[in-house]
Amino acid sequence: MQAYPLIPHAAKPPLAVRAVEARVGNHDPHWLSLRWRIDASAGVVVPPPAGKLRRDGLWQTTCFELFLQPDGEAGYCEFNLSPSEAWNVYDFHAYREGMCERKAARAPVLTMRPGSSFAIFDAAIPRSLLPTEPCAMGLTAVIEETGGHKSYWSIAHPDTDAPDFHHAACFAARLEAPHAP
């Protein structure tokens, strides 16, 4: 798995969380594997189980996100993945324009393993939900800590006063097209 250390946005730093790392496994022809590790996770708010349902607004508490923009296209997709097992995936025609839910025949498999010193969040996304072309990729996390404090983590951030995961600066990694089975 390829590791990507995430950094908090300067305007929204964490209280106690020391580090967040995302890992991507792109070797399975049927699933994309993602893992986020949160260090110093004792105060992280984990939403209660909600079941494998599509929901909006998951980013309002602890949530993990994947952004993919196929090469040469203005449009991109956003995956919202919650420790509650709720999820959603949206398509955008351009920067924050034309948002609509992407059709999905199968839900991602989401697993949260909280702990006092670190927590692990695993996601397996069916290939049928992913673009088939090579993509610019953004890996992000919204981490809520006790008391409602939120920090916003990404591979890279734009030079803005507030976090903006949709900004092109956050798409700082690559996801190659999957190989046919």
Image (spheres, rainbow, N blue to C red):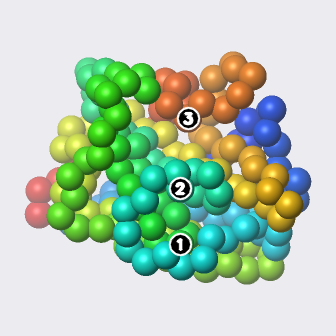
Q: Are marks 2 and 1 in contact (CB under 8 Å)?
A: yes
Residue 19: which quarter of the image? bottom right
Q: Looking at the image, is 166 positioned above or below residue 140? A: above
SS type, badge 3: loop
Q: Residue at image x 53%, y 56%?
A: 58
Comes first in the chain, label 3 or label 2: 2
Q: Which mark is residue 84?
A: 1
Task: Give how far across and how far down residue 160 sits, in percent.
Answer: 70, 20
Task: Give how far across and how far down residue 2 sits, in percent.
Answer: 48, 54
Q: Looking at numbered disc 2 in the image, what kind of residue is underneath it?
A: Leu
Q: Is residue 181 left or right of residue 59?
A: left
Q: Residue at image x 26%, y 63%?
A: 126
Comes first in the chain, label 3 or label 1: 1
Q: Is residue 137 left or right of residue 143?
A: left
| 112 or 133, nearer to the observer | 112
Identify residue for label 3. 165
